[in-house]
Amino acid sequence: MAYRIVNKSQLSENVFRIDVEAPLVAQARKAGQFVIVSPEAEAGERIPLTIAGADQEKGTIRLIFQRVGKTTAQMAEIPEGGALGYVAGPLGRPTHIEKFGTVVCVGGGIGVAPLLPIAEAMKDAGNTVVSILGARTKDLLILEEQFTSLSDESIIVTDDGSYGRKALVTEPLQEVCARSPKPDLAVAIGPAIMMKFCCEVTRRYGVPTQVSLNTIMVDGTGMCGGCRVEVGGQTRFVCVDGPEFDGHQVNFDLMMRRMDAYKDLEKRALQQYKDHQCKIGLDRK
Amino acid sequence: MPTHPVDIDMNEQEKYLQELLTKQAQGQLKPKDRYAIKPQDMPAQDAVKRRHAMSEVALGYTETQARLEAMRCLQCANAPCVEGCPVRIRIRDFIGEITKGQYDRALEIIKENSLLPAVCGRVCPQEVQCQERCTVGKKFKDVNMSVSIGRLERYAADLAHGGGQTPAVAPPTGKKVAVIGSGPGGIVVAADTRRAGHEVTLFEAFHKPGGVMVYGIPEFRLPKAIVQEEIDVLKKMGVKIVCNFIVGRTRTIEQLMKEDGFEAVYVGVGAGLPKFMGIEGEHLVGVYSANEYLTRANLMKAYEFGKGADTPIAVSKKVAVLGGGNVAMDAARMAVRLGAEKVYLVYRRSETEMPARIEEVRHAKEEGVIFCTLQNPKRILGNDAGQVVGMECLRYELGEPDESGRRRPVAIGGSEFVMNVDTVIVAIGNGANPLIQQTTPGLEFNQWGNIVVDENCRTSMKGVYAGGDIVLGTATVILAMGQGRIAAQAINTDLAK
Ligand SMILES: Cc1cc2nc3c(=O)[nH]c(=O)nc-3n(C[C@H](O)[C@H](O)[C@H](O)COP(=O)(O)OP(=O)(O)OC[C@H]3O[C@@H](n4cnc5c(N)ncnc54)[C@H](O)[C@@H]3O)c2cc1C
Ligand SMILES: Cc1cc2nc3c(=O)[nH]c(=O)nc-3n(C[C@H](O)[C@H](O)[C@H](O)COP(=O)(O)OP(=O)(O)OC[C@H]3O[C@@H](n4cnc5c(N)ncnc54)[C@H](O)[C@@H]3O)c2cc1C
Ligand code: SF4
Ligand code: SF4
Ligand code: FES
């Protein structure tokens, strides 16, 4: 298995899309699952990335990743025709797909990528799909076309108003939830802080909400416990019990703390988040 | 070269050995002469220097030491030691060969029953297995006086280092065997079924084969090169090794059997779902499971951070390790090596009840690990940033024995105190990984999530066999190997039908 990158493109300044040879993963994967990859075969960090799509015939999977640190930067350097060290998966439980009725899909920043296969599967299952995509600014918006073509309704927001509505994703989400009939399900994927606030909105309207958690992982098979989160007061492992959970049960505050050891106060965490590339501000009222 | 005191000792020891050998040749060596031979200590790296070294601590016997130690064996007619070994190595016989200097022959005897002598010699809990039964230890009423069977096993295995023979493989049977998990159990099944001529594929979820021997047990106790040699032997025998393949996810057992043509599947996926204590503060930054801590350190070489290894690990000043088994010792000793100033080992019973190997306890103490027995955490304390700043503990005393026969620890009311630590490593055991259970309908599991097998390691599903930690709960390398042996035997028998 060579894990060759057969196709590579840059979606925005720091977001890359690659199609990687991994025939068995391409065959087995379902919406909502992820892989563990490493740019090097021996050393190197193992990082989780959601499978954004697959081509079973070509035996490739599609990954969309944001350059945030060393490993993703290293991956961004690998040219088309080059290869990853390894790809292991698919991991995690697949998304529960059925005909719910109306599903509102909310994606923020890089979270838009993992949301795509889920939105597609929801649509295929006969749901009415309303999508809400958010980015800090126009240039950082990804996969807009794919979402507009699959959704029954799509809403784009940017923090700075450079494109679509000048708002945070929670604003249109609240409007959609306030409609009658209200949506049957919300799926929110993005930075933890975004998911947290989305869940606060949907909770008010009693709309069940699925979130996909992106904790730090080591093995991705349930062996280390590094990915643990508290859901409904219980310790759960994101890699084997998730990555999707009932957002109303997730203790996001604990999760955010675990995800960044360098943040001193939650206030500062918010500030840092604002400066972060994949930011969709949420603290404006 | 300046003469070193050790050299003089060695010469005297050599003379002593020669005398003993002469006596033996004349048939005049009495048990009392054998009892008089001092147990040979294993040379070890200096305790201070090794605090900063990842290389192996126990250096192994010299030839003279090995033969002297072997001379301590009484060659008992009934060899009670053998009963204590889970794979029934012919201990008396291989030790006899060592006294004669027939090291190759000794290794051959060991290999009849154990495929991984270099590993077991190092990591077996001998004091509760073979050495516990040894007549010499019984005579002195001290298990530490028993013949050092494990060390002798290691000696014989290390001599053959690299030069071990590749076992012969029978002509192809055209049957395919899948082995899931490359721990000690899986390695043995792969070797034994391949020898019988089957086409064998070993699937491993991680990017490196070897199981816990690679990602759990640290380099300073079990050099990775030893495990790698065993893997290389498998490759030479023609076993196909497929890494980064997660059975249950990449392919299910059903797919392997129905679509990929495997007629027999051995499940040796280990335990490895870390348990936490369920106390307040376990989600704080700085709390690790031992699995995570050791995996980061071993497999991802976090200790070489900045030198090509990218997996970060907390730089800790004061570390508390919770538990009293081998895993806890390994985590504590690893923390020492990663530069912690103070490492506390917190255990709720007393030292006598600790399940860790005696040698590991001793090594940990020599390296400066501070033992805090009869204490247990009540909660972990954090600061506003969610980082560990301390641990509130309770003192314990020992009460009546419980089901396990060990005295039950009882908390002393009002004895709370705070321990200043910035890192907490939880090493209180592993549960069963649910992945195979979730993805293999029809396979029977018990209430703890362990696979149910019969005495031949056959599961409730036809063609599926299991062994090691996923069956036994948390066990040992040798027990996993022993089950691998049994399972391979069953596979070979069933496939011959
Ligand atoms: C199930 C799952 C699916 C994921 N899917 C995707 C995906 O499809 N595309 C994508 O771009 N990313 C995804 N992530 C996040 C991705 O794994 C991290 O961005 C990556 O590990 C960062 O590695 P690095 O070495 O480049 O950065 P590091 O040097 O490790 O970190 C750089 C910065 O990123 C932050 N960071 C580290 N790990 C994570 C993480 N897991 N989540 C969020 N921030 C993190 C750090 O706090 C730091 O600020 C997913 C994570 C999980 C758990
Ligand atoms: C830190 C530590 C120290 C220890 N010290 C000692 C000691 O001193 N002496 C001793 O005798 N024992 C010791 N043990 C216990 C011993 O290592 C285990 O009992 C033994 O390794 C179990 O072997 P196993 O065959 O069940 O497989 P394991 O060694 O547990 O390996 C299982 C393998 O299966 C892989 N796997 C899991 N799921 C899948 C899947 N779905 N698909 C593919 N592959 C999968 C895993 O990645 C792993 O490589 C220690 C354990 C630990 C963690
Ligand atoms: S394998 Fe282990 S128990 Fe058996 S003789 Fe060797 S050291 Fe003793
Ligand atoms: S019991 Fe001890 S002395 Fe007797 S044969 Fe075994 S190792 Fe030798
Ligand atoms: S990533 Fe290790 S248990 Fe989930």
Image (cartoon, helix red, strand yellow):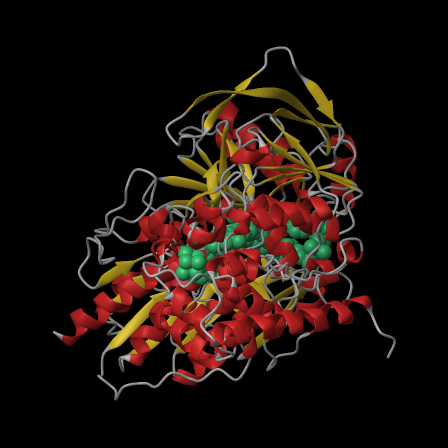
Assign the C terminus of chain A to one quadrant of the image: top right
Residue B163 relative to residue B478: left or right: right
The picture quadrant where one finds residue A38 is bottom right
* Along the viewing direction, whichever of B262 and B454 lies nearer the viewer: B454
Q: Residue at x 56, y 59 (%)?
A: B215
- Residue A53 position within the rendered picture, expressed as x and y whole percent measured from the top left: 47, 63
Residue A252 relative to residue B486: left or right: right
Residue B321 relative to residue A50: left or right: right
Residue A244 relative to residue A122: left or right: right
- Residue A74 position within the rendered picture, expressed as x and y whole percent measured from the top left: 70, 68
- Whether residue B135 is visible: yes
Residue at the top extreme, as displayed: B414
Residue at the bottom extreme, as displayed: B171
Q: Residue at x 32, y 78 (%)?
A: B194
Q: Residue at x 57, y 46 (%)?
A: B358
- Residue B111 position within the rendered picture, expressed as x and y whole percent measured from the top left: 40, 73
A260 relative to B207, above or below: above
* Along the viewing direction, whichever of B166 and B385 lies nearer the viewer: B166
A195 relative to B119, above or below: above
- Residue B381 position within the rendered picture, expressed as x and y whole percent measured from the top left: 69, 26
B365 relative to A283, above or below: below
- Whether residue A220 is visible: no
